[in-house]
Amino acid sequence: MLHAKGETDWRKIPWLKRSESPEYTGRAVAALAGDPQLMRKSGKTFHVGELAGEYGFTDIDGTQPHWGNYARKKYGKYKICDERFYSYWVPGLVELIFPDWF
């Protein structure tokens, strides 16, 4: 949080009000690390808000920020970046653009 005076101040910045703390992301990593069925998630991408709903953790202020839900409320219908969406890019298009990555 380069723009804040500390982790406790991150939501005082207008454009970060709907964001999440670094701890929220850390809690997602901890939840995944403790999941005995972790391999079922291998090779996939997840939003922290989705994982919070699944594993039941919250951000440091007790909320469960979910960017997708926020965007749907604020902007209406939008392209959901789910597994199907990402499968178009990886490895497909990304492999074409960056063949050295694979």
Image: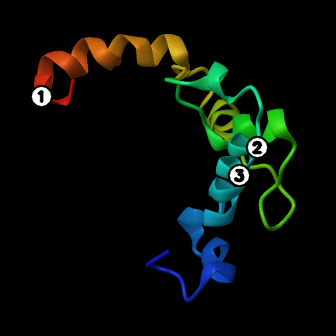
Q: Locate residue 7 relative to residue 50 in the image: left or right.
A: left
Marks 3/2 in contact by CB < 8 Å: the verdict is yes
Which residue sits at x=63%, y=54%?
25
Q: Is residue 18 visible?
A: no
Number of the label disc, if any, that sits on residue 59: none
Residue corresponding to mark 3: 30
Q: Is residue 79 visible?
A: yes
Residue corresponding to mark 2: 34
Most foreground residue, 24 or 11: 24
Quarter that holds the C terminus: top left
As shown in the figure, which amino acid type bears the numbered disc 2?
A: Gly
Most foreground residue, 74 or 59: 59
Q: Secondary structure at mark 3?
A: helix
Q: Position of residue 60 (x, y in %)?
A: 79, 67
Number of the label disc, if any, that sits on residue 100: 1
Q: Locate residue 44 relative to residue 65 in the image: left or right.
A: left
Q: Nearer the viewer, mark 2 or mark 1?
A: 2
